[in-house]
Amino acid sequence: MPARELQQQLDALREQIDQNPPLSQEERVHLNDLAQQIEAQLNLESASNDTNLADSVNLTVERFELNHPTLAGTLRNIVQTLGNMGI
């Protein structure tokens, strides 16, 4: 169940990247790279203790929370789901 929830949140993140606020090229690349890392974790379907991924998402939340609060909210949901999956 958490994997499906994470996939839905990842889809929401990608949609926001495509449609939402004016992002710089660097921000867009960073978010797309992060989305690819999350997708790779989903494809593994393992609850490994890859705390680097959760740390990366948390750092991205901090980076975007002031200027892009909707993106930051989606990223927070992803962090929560990763935690629920044991990642």
Image (cartoon, rainbow, N blue to C red):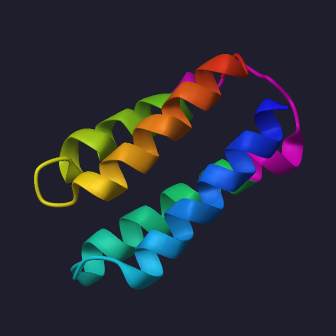
Q: Is residue 67 magenta?
A: no
Count every numbered label the image shows and give the total.
0
Which one is nearer the viewer's eye here, 71 or 35?
A: 71
> In screen coordinates, is 9 left or right of 65?
right
The residue drawn where x is 43% and y is 30% is 55
Q: Give the residues in magenta.
A: 40-51
The residue drawn where x is 85% and y is 32% is 1
From this view, report whether residue 47 is shown above or below residue 63: above
Q: Position of residue 27 (x, y in %)?
A: 28, 70
Which one is nearer the viewer's eye here, 52 or 71?
A: 71
Q: Position of residue 23 (x, y in %)?
A: 24, 78
> In screen coordinates, is 32 left or right of 28?
right
Residue 5 in which image quadrant? top right
> In screen coordinates, is 78 left or right of 31?
right
User: The C terminus appears in which quarter of the rendering?
Assistant: top right
Q: Position of residue 62 (x, y in %)?
A: 22, 39
Q: Position of residue 37 (x, y in %)?
A: 62, 52
> In screen coordinates, is 50 left or right of 55?
right
Q: Is residue 46 magenta?
A: yes
The residue drawn where x is 28% and y is 83% is 25
